[in-house]
Image (tube, rainbow, N blue to C red):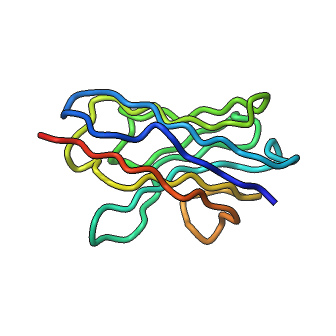
Amino acid sequence: QVQLVESGGGLVQAGDSLTLSCAASGRYFSLYSMGWFRQAPGKGRDFVAGITRNAGTTYYADSVKDRFTISRDNAKITVYLQMNSLKPEDTAVYYCAAGRNGGREQYTYDYWGQGTQVTVSS
């Protein structure tokens, strides 16, 4: 069992940066691939970024590639999402997720946080 708690969301202006954190509890964090997803108002939940259990591989949605960076610290059992050059279309609730297999699809993740709101004003 893994519990996930996101933090770091807020209201920023276009072009600003923000770092989200996802603190995990549970003994087997290092065994899970981690992902970030987001859900904009009135839309479905979309993949943003993923990282393998040993941080050897990261992958991103095209819409955030070259602006966002996912990382993890297994010693601190925390995963991060560094977001640069934020745009109004990045406004959404951001969720972190843990899964044995990871990937770009929601169904491959077993555990989810409650989400943190990111609002980017123009």
Nearer-the-camera pick, 39 or 102: 39
Q: What residue is rendered at 47% in x and 57% in y?
A: 47
Nearer-the-camera pick, 62 or 34: 34
Quarter-wise, where is residue 22 in the image? top right
Q: What residue is rendered at 58% in x and 50% in y?
A: 35
Q: Position of residue 37 (x, y in %)?
A: 48, 55
Q: Position of residue 100 (x, y in %)?
A: 77, 58
Quarter-wise, where is residue 72 in the image? top right
Nearer-the-camera pick, 9 or 106: 9
Q: Quadrant of the C terminus?
A: top left
The answer to whether 35 appears left or right of 61 in the picture is right
Count of all numbered marks drawn on residues in the image: 0
Q: Quadrant of the N terminus?
A: bottom right
Nearer-the-camera pick, 81 or 33: 81
Q: What residue is rendered at 62% in x and 38% in y?
A: 79
The answer to whether 60 appears left or right of 101 in the picture is left
Q: Position of residue 7 (x, y in %)?
A: 51, 41
Q: What residue is rendered at 47% in x and 45% in y?
A: 60
Q: Position of residue 51 (x, y in %)?
A: 63, 42
> Outermost residue toward the right?
27
Q: Vertically, is 44 above or below 61?
A: below
